[in-house]
Image (spheres, grey):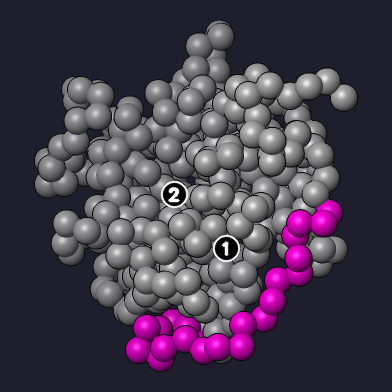
Amino acid sequence: MPAQHNVPPDMLRSYERMLESCAPPKRATATLRPESLPRRALENVVTFAYGHLHVMRAPQNVVRDSRQRVLVADPAIPAVHVLDPKSNSSFRIVGGPGRRIQSVSDVDVDADDNIYVADAARGVLLVFDPQGRFLREMGTFHGETMYDQITAIAIDRRARHLYVADGPANQISMLDLEGNLLKWLGQGRSNTRPGELIRREAAGAQQFNYPTDIAIGDGYVAVLDSAGTRVRLMDADGTLMGGFTVQQSAEDRAYAIGIDRRGNIYVSYPDISSIRVYSAHGQVLGALGYAGGGVGQFLGPEGLWIDDANRLYVADTKNARVELFQLASAE
């Protein structure tokens, strides 16, 4: 096999299997502090931890596919981990200098378990099959990239739509899964300088201001906007329906959002190592977690995702792991 240049010695090559380093997840025996859980939203909490410190470095975003595999974007390597707790096996798609992927900012999967990776450095999306084999590149037009920097992606698996947030361009696009642009959602703020933010109240009804995450709900889409300080809701056609602030102090800069089967919105706060739960109208329902390395504790949690079984996956970034919680059923 040819020598690999500019790749840390402990990193695997693209598509190389890693069978010995992913132990089965262990069921937690400790319990969470009752006051840390929104009682109406969470019950029968079951926690798992995926990965070891020498496998993950700083997991940033997480998603689960139909095979129950957990996919984790780990930009510190950079790589996408594909962890299969059922078969006690895993592999990862590695990026970096000299590789197809230069950086990893987000990951999602479609209904066929194809893997979509956002490359923030190149401003493109790369698609791999479920085994990690490259399929195609998306997000270019006549050789030019469509995006300044991809800050988030989300796939509506039923509608087969791909949403892409471009933070610096203050814009969100809707594509089909072949990469064809269907529409631009909202009106981007084209009159701001790169990196310049505007006040929330100055963003118009159909405008975004540095969107950083997207979550798919039942009939609507939630966008973490204004550089992590408010949530905006759109209908299936991309019309903005409303929103609410999620910043209560200077440390409340949110990173990611997810939507459970009840329509509640979960928001991660890395600086305070907690996850807050809101109703779709912006009412605070409760909070989950506190700083630490134990069960139900987080250190700088960033990405989160909720599957169709109402299980919450949290990228516990500074603890270099993913935690899993069973949420209350929607019935």
Query: Which residue is labeled 2 in the image?
Result: 214
Query: Which residue is labeled 1 in the image?
Result: 322
Q: Read off the magenta span.
A: 19-43
Question: Mark 2 vs mark 1: which is more N-terminal?
Answer: 2
Question: Residue 200: x, y in percent?
Answer: 16, 46
Q: Nearer the viewer, residue 86 or 150?
A: 86
Sort mark 2 into few (<14), some (14-19) or many (20+) by Cα contacts within 10 Å. many
Point 57% across, 54% down: residue: 62
Q: Is residue 17 above or below residue 305?
A: above
Closer to the camera: disc 2 or disc 1? 1
Element under label 2? Answer: strand
The quadrant in which the C terminus is found is bottom right
Q: Nearer the viewer, residue 50 or 1?
A: 1
Point 83% across, 45% down: residue: 17
Q: Is residue 21 magenta?
A: yes
Which residue is outermost to the right? 1
Of the residues shown, which amino acid type is indicated by label 1? Answer: Val
Q: Is residue 138 above or below residue 94?
A: above
